[in-house]
Amino acid sequence: MTLLDVKDLYAEVAQQQILKGLNLKVNAGEVHAIMGPNGSGKSTLANVLAGRPGYDVTAGDVVFEGHSIVDWEAHDRAHAGVFLAFQYPVEIPGVSNMEFLKASIDSKAFANDEAQPAAAGFIKEVRKLAQSLDLNPEFLKRGVNEGFSGGEKKRNEVLQLLLLQPRLAVLDETDSGLDIDALQVVAEGVNRFRSDDNGVVLITHYQRLLEYIVPDFVHVLADGRIVQSGDKSLALELEEKGYAWLT
Amino acid sequence: MAHVNLELPAAAAPPKWFGTVTEQSLNQQLNGALNHKMHRERWKYTRVPPVLALLKEPGAPFETQLPEGVTLRHVAHDSMDTPAQVFFGEALAETLQHAPEATAWLCYQPNVQVLDVEAEVSEPLILKGAALHQPLIIRLAANASLDLHEIYDGNEGSSQLQSIWIDMQPGSRVQHSRNSFTTGTHWQYLRVNIGRDATYHLHNHSAGAELRRQDMQLICAAPGAHAEVTSAAFIGSKTHLDQQITVEHRAAHTTSEQTFHNIAAGGAKVTFNGRIHIHEHCASVDANLSNKNLSLGDNAVINTKPELEIYTDDVKCSHGATVGSLDQDHLFYCASRGIAPQQARTLLSQAFLQVCTLGPLAESAQQFLQQQAQSEVEGG
């Protein structure tokens, strides 16, 4: 079943064309790794998929579960099941992590006409999830990402991923800034999320993340379009040869 | 601003405990201070006449239950016992230069209330009610401590005035929490003299009103003195708040920390003027001031002026002010998790105030301020 179908997508940021005819199809149960040199458009793709204001689609289409979502607002995409794990998660002092998570899950439940979880059970579940990601549950009382280390922020992103259970997870350089232990914890969390019902778009610079999250497909993005696709062996080839031979 | 010659109501007779100043000299000095360019600058964005009009009215004593360890007395004009030497007597000229209205209020009222705190007081002293209150002088003995709560809430539109003078002896501690949520004309004057190793902390929570003016003068008078202010305010549509705060470091090895967060709704008018003044020969002072303002709608007027006045080299000092709207990155982060724009704006506005809503009255303050923010966002 096709979850995501990106069709000949052109997108610009601040009137600069970044994506130039990108095609990508993700089926349920698949993990697609997107690799590419700096400035190739990887993060732009992530933001366009999530519906970030200022990232304008100028041509082509993004179809998610049969619906064109290019005109949908970010929160509507989230309700439908699109999730972006940020490369640089923001800090929001004054909104506790727990409050933020409850607001997120309640919003999604409300939009999908589902029952909102009871507070007590929800808190218990979140604390359990935090522990499983080696994240101190006491941090849940703090402001969103407030005072978190880089690794803790990324683990918090994965916590949200596991809690919200989206249909499509777009992970934007989730491995950046992580030491090897944190990388393993984050990868383990993403692997726990993987199922036959959902899909993952994994954006990364380095092959090392793919040792822990084994992709079904690897794509090379260069100058706003995918120039090469293959299986996980392509990542090893890139590690050895770099990107220059493809661009 | 058109120049208006400001005059205090006539017959401001000085209490005997002011010292040797004559009535004529006092009135000259008060009116001189009132028309001084520095004073006019401090009142640039708030009309003085409504406040001067309040001074003509009779004041009422605070009606409060005194916790154990606090004694109350009324000091009349003819008393020879100066209730707070640090503000009057030889210090009178400086006091009235900085605070002519508050000094005049002392003269117009037949009594001042004096609270003596001799030891650690476990129960809070609670001041409440909408009124023009007689001046209140609180004196803390060495190593005494007091939790002071001021609560002005409800939809009372009547005029209010509080003038509170606190003298803190060495090692004493005051935790002062103040919720000012009434809607009429409200002037609040506060002057605190912080002695050696004494700590004063104000948790200030406010809403806009027809006119709300808050003057605060905190003086770190001896080594080890520490002053701290955290302040959160929501200034609703067509309401007003003017905060004027001066922290003076008059001794070496003193510290201060001030954080003010204000949200201005469309059509609101908010003024913040914060000044850190470090006197000569006051080395190793550490003083910080931050004022952040969030505009939620069109036509909000925000004036902010953080100032430093430093006369000693070896000090650590920072000040800053920001004026802006909600952070787009924060809004997108919320949206990416399914939180719709209106709910996100409410959540982020409430969070902006919450970080400065602290202390024993925080819960009721949060409830009030969050409701205000929610109404504004949803109404807008």
Image (spheres, coloured by chain):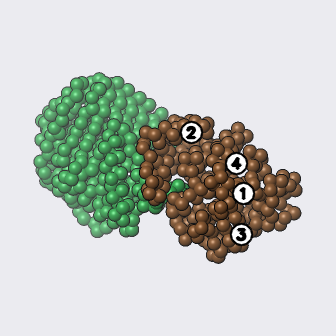
In contact (CB < 8 Å): disc 4 and disc 1: no
Of all chains, the one bearing label 3 is A
Which chain, by letter, is brown?
A
How packed mark 4 is, by other alpha carbons closer than 10 Å (few <14, some 14-19, many 20 or more), is many
Q: Distance between the residues labelled 4 and 3?
A: 24 Å
- Compare marks 4 and 3 and give the one earlier in the sequence: 3
Q: Distance between the residues labelled 2 and 3?
A: 36 Å
| Tag 4 residue | A175
Q: Name the spot of residue A120 as percent of width and height, x first.
A: 43, 39
| Tag 3 residue | A22
Q: What element carries label 3?
A: strand
| Picture residue at 44% right of the left edge, 31% below the top | B224
Along the line of sight, the residue nearer the viewer: B191 or B131: B131
Name chain B's colour.
Answer: green
Of all chains, the one bearing label 2 is A
- Compare marks 4 and 1 and give the one earlier in the sequence: 1
Q: Name the spot of residue A203 as percent of width and height, x first.
A: 70, 56
* Residue type highlighted by circle 4: Asp
Q: Distance between the residues labelled 3 and 1?
A: 14 Å
| Picture residue at 70% right of the left edge, 49% below the top | A176
| Tag 1 residue | A32
| Tag 2 residue | A130
Residue A115 visible: yes
- Compare marks 3 and 1 and give the one earlier in the sequence: 3
Q: Is mark 1 on a helix, strand or loop?
A: strand
